[in-house]
Image (cartoon, rainbow, N blue to C red):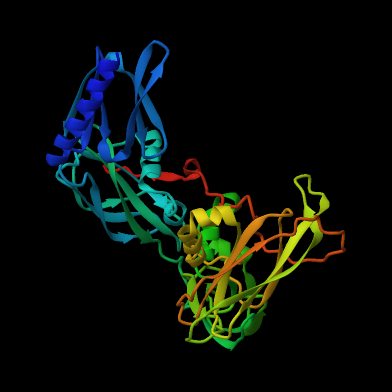
Amino acid sequence: MKKLLLAIVILFAGISLNAQNKKCNRLFLHQKGNDPVVYIMNKIDSISFAEKGSSDNLILHKSNGTREEFLVDELDSLIFKNVEGRVAADVNIINSSATSVTLDIMRTTSCVEYKMACMDYNSISTFGDDDLIYYFDKNVTETYSQDFENVEITGLSLDYNTEYAIVTVGVDEYGLSCDVVRAKFSTPAQGLVGSPDVNVEVIENNLYDFTLKFTPNSDVSKYSVLVAQEGNIDYQYIMFSYAFDWQNTGDMIEGWGLEFKNTNTYQYTSQTPNTYYEVYIQALDANGNRAPYKVFKFKSKGAGGEGIAKVDITLGVYKLAEWMNENYEWVMLPSQFITFTPNDQTSAYRFNVILAENYKKDIDGYQEDLFSKPFMQTDGWYQYETLTTDYQIDPGTDCVAIATAMNINDEWGPVTELYFTTSDKMPSKTAAATYRVNTDLVNEKQHNGAKKSIEHIQAIPLIIK
C-alpha cells in the first residue's frame, strides 16, 4: 500500500506539471464501478493522504473549506482535461421596471447552459462567487441553453426605488457551476408628484462635531436623514436588513433616520476628526411616495500638519485597578498605565502593547498591523489626542509599547517603541477610576461582524418563455 501511495503522489506531481503545460483546469477522479467525479482545479486548495485503519484515503481540500475523501484502493485513474476561457452567461440590462426587465443574455463559448435569478443587490454584495454557486446549486433548478436578445421578462413584483441584480451561473460541459455574473439595475420611483429634493450644507465643521442644514424644495412633504461614516450605512443595511425586514435602503433611512418636514439645522456631536461622512436622505412627495434616496458626502475637520507625525510613549504607575472577569464581576488586577502623546503634526494615531517575546518574533507583522486601515471606517480604530490608558499585566513581565501616527496627508510617521518590565512585586490596592481601550495584552480580540447567511437571501426565479 505504501508503494501504491508513493506511486499516486508521483503520478499527481507528474500530471500536475503536465496539466500546467497544457493549461488543464478540470480533474476527473475515476472510481472502480462508478462514474467519474469532476472538479474545477482552482477550487482545490490541496491534496493529502491519510491512513485510516487498514486503508489509505486520498483527501481533496477545497478552497471553500470543505473536503472530500476517497479510498485509494477504489481509485481507478486520474485524468486532467481543459475547458477554455470563462464559463459564463453575460447579461446586458436594457431597461427595467417593478414588473419587468428587458435584457440580452450571451453565453461564452464554453458555457453549455446557465441558471439565473433576480436578487436584491445589497443583500448579495458581501457574498462571494462560491457562496452564490452553492445557493444556486441548492435552490435554482431551471436551466437555459440558448442566448437571448432584447427579451422581456414579465410578471415580476419588485419594490420601487430598489437596487436588484440579475445573477447568472454558467455551467460547463461536465455539469460544473463555474462563473458568476451580476448585472445590477434599479427599479424606478413610484409615480412621483414633482421632483422632491433636499439640499444639504455643512454650516459648521469642528474636530468632534459638525452641523448640517437641510433645505427641502416645495415638492417634499417630509424627509428622513441618516448620517454615518463612509460605508457604514451600506454595511449596516447588509447586516440588519433581514432582521428588520428592510426591502431597500429607503426602508432603513426611514426606520433609523431623523424625520423632518421643513428646513432644519442639526448638530452631530461625538464625531471623528478627519473622517469621510455620508448623509443619506429619503424624501417623500405630497402623496407619500419615495423619491430616489440621495447621498451627500463630506469630510470632517482634521487636525495635524504636513510634517512628520510621531507619538511619544510614557510609562506611568503600576497599580491594582478594576477589571471585569469572565463572570462579569469587578476584580482588582495589576495594571500598567501608559500615556500616548501625539505631536502637533498628527492627524490620527494607533498603538498597541505586546509581550516582548512575541513582538521580537514578528516585529514587521506587528508594525504592519499598526499601519493598517479598516476595510470600512470604524470607531476606535484611530486615536486623536493624548491618551492615558492601562493594560492588565502580571508582575515581572517583559513588554513593549508601540505607536505610530499619520499626518493630515495620511502619511505615516516612524514607529515609536518602548520596552519595559513590570515590577516584580504585586502593587498595593489603590482605588482606581480608569479609561480603557478595548485591547487585550495576551489574548488579542478580533471583532468580526455577523454576516447574513446565504440561506436567508431570496432569489426570484426568472422564466423566459
Query: Residue farthest to the left?
Result: 22
Query: Where residue 461 appears, x then y in whole percent?
Result: 37, 42
Look at 48% across and 40% down and name the residue there: 455
Query: Residue farthest to the front?
Result: 424
Query: Residue farthest to the bottom?
Result: 203
Front residue of this view, candidates 354 and 326: 354
Query: Where residue 383 appears, x then y in whole percent?
Result: 61, 72
**Residue 272 visible in the displayed image:** no
Relative height, residue 294 to residue 117 (above, below): below
For the N terminus, the image quarter is top left
Relative height, residue 3 to residue 24 (above, below): above
Q: Is residue 125 left or right of residue 14?
A: right
Front residue of this view, candidates 135 and 389: 389
Relative height, residue 441 to residue 75 (above, below): below
Q: Is residue 238 left or right of residue 354?
A: left
Look at 52% across and 47% down and name the residue there: 452
For the C terminus, the image quarter is top left
